[in-house]
Structures are given as structure tokens and as C-alpha cells.
Image: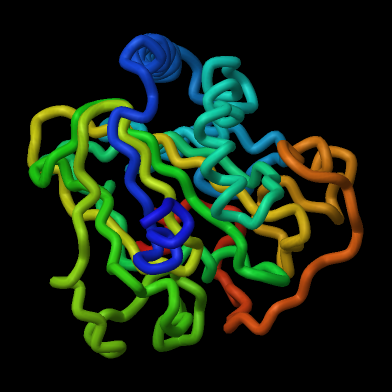
Amino acid sequence: MNDLNLFKKDGFLIKENFISQKKIDKINKIVKEVISKETKGNKDNATNGTQSYDNYHFVYNSNSSKNKEILRLNNPQNRHKVFYELSRDKKIISVAKKLLGGTVRFHLGKLNFKLPNKKKGSEIGWHQDWAFYPHTNDDLITVGIYLDDCYEKNGPLKIIKNSHKKKLYSHHNKENYFIGKIDTKKNKIGTNNSISITGTAGTVVFFHCRAVHGSGHNLMNNSRPLILFGYRACDAWPLINDGNPHPEVDLDNYDKNIIVGNKSIKPRLTKVPTIIPLPKKKHYVSIYELQKN
């Protein structure tokens, strides 16, 4: 079965050893430098609240300076050439282009650290990315790149097969606030049917924006880094500002994020289930912060 058919059937596609070890080593070297600089240096980058549109910032597991550890670096590609180059990697883009129907616009970047279990705070509840950023059509994918070997014990990304074809689940709580996670009991989602995305460093997974996914605790002693890049078809236009390159904020910048395809202000509208991710208690905060509420 070819890549596109497999992706359409399952909602995800795994490519083992897709990024060379040489590239992975180069990226890991920069990751170490960035973390070392951030943990030793100033904390001006830290935000738990609003974010600028450059949107490069660290997310911590705590506000207190004692237990502060980095959960995530948002949009590393905005400051570090090695991440920018990876986000435009020819191999990744050629697969993205197939899965998105021929055009590719960069959407967002995240470097998740998945802290060890004894430092709770980095598990991610079951959710669909689509719930966070509805568009005029659902040709959006997330691409996950493992920087270290990842096995069951590291708290791998887990995806429920075929869930991208099913419904859009509510990600709101009882008070009707958007909290970015699904009540799996109430919705009778059999999370036992999920597939663990494991693999060596350099393994890449491509998954549909409506695929239900999450990840548990990392039971190892060291963190498990994963880069996530989001891409969208050029004619998929956002219905709401999610704090990432957005046409109403800066159209030139939005168009600069086109990797394959041409500028156009004609969105393609398809019949997709949509729930607007509002109201929120806080805007432009991380999924960790949202799911805590």
C-alpha cells in the first residue's frame, strides 16, 4: 500500500530511520546548548501567559523557581537554523506534499521534552489537534521526529488508529471551557486500541489533524525529546487565531510560510466537523496549562 493510502486508512504513517544519525546528532548538540543556556541564564523567555507572534518561548512545568523544568520550547525554528532547515527538509516536505494534496504551508513548531516520570507534568491527555485550530478544510498534518530512541518505557506518542475518520470530540469541560482534552470515559473511547509510536532516533511519524492521540509518563530517568512540526494545505485557512502565523495578524508572514504552492486568498471549504475552541480561561497557553484546568 502506498504512503497516501496507508495514511488515509490509518490516520498516520511511520517512517523509520528517516532522518540521518548525523543530522540528529547535530540537532541534539544544539538542543543541549539551548537548554543549558536557558537553565543557567536569564528567565525572560519564560511565559505561562501570553506570547508574542515571534512566539519563541519556553514552557515550564511549574511557576516556582525551585522545581522549574522545561516541558517545551515553542517554535525553535524561529531562532535556530538547524530547526528551520529540518522543518523544510526535502524528505519530510515530499511526504507532506503527498498527504496534503500537493501544497504545503508551515504552521507551527514545538520541541517537547517529556520529562522523566518522577518529575510529573509532561503527560499529554487524549486530544485531536483539529480541536485547537479548526480550518476551512482538514488537510493539516503533524509531523513528529524522535531525537532519541523511543520505546514503551519512554512514554511514546500513542495514536488511535482510524480515529481521524470518526467524529470530532468535545475538548470542553463541564463548565464549557475549552481545556484541550477529551473525556475518554464519557465518550467511550477505547484507548486500549491505541498504537504506540516507537522507534529509533530519526524515526518520523506523520499524522492527521483529527487523529486522537496522547502520551503517558516517561518511566526512564532521562527526558525523551520529540520535535513536532505542523503543516497545512495552502488553501486551508484558519477559522480562529491560535497564536501561530495567522493571516489577519500578518499576511506577508503567513504567505512566507508557504513551502510548496502559490499565494491565494481563496480558501477551500469542505464539510468538516468544527467546534470553536472557546471560551478559554487563558489564551495562547500550552496544552499542559490548558489540560491542567
For the N terminus, the image quarter is bottom left
* Residue in front for this viewpoint, 252 or 99: 99
Is 290 or 269 nearer to us in this picture? 269
Residue lying at the far front of the rendered structure: 1
Coloured how?
A: rainbow
**Would residue 17 appear left or right of 131 to someone viewing this image?**
left
What's the residue at 89%, 64% (across, down)?
266
Residue 239 position in % (x across, y down) = 73, 69
Q: How many marks?
A: 0
Q: Using residue 260 as the reference point, say whether residue 190 is left or right of it.
A: left
Q: Is residue 34 above or below residue 51?
A: above
Q: As drawn, is 47 to the left or to the right of 263?
A: left
Q: Is residue 173 above or below residue 159?
A: below
Task: Residue 37: give x, y in percent of width and height.
Answer: 43, 12
Q: Quadrant of residue 151?
A: top left
Q: Where does the image place residue 100, in percent across and percent down from the top left? A: 61, 55
Please give the name of the residue rendered at 51% of the width and 35% of the height, measured from the top-left corner. 92
Residue 211, horizontal then vertical, whole percent: 40, 66
Residue 163 shows in the view: yes
- Tell me the quadrant of the picture where the C terminus can be found: bottom left
Quadrant position of residue 276: bottom right
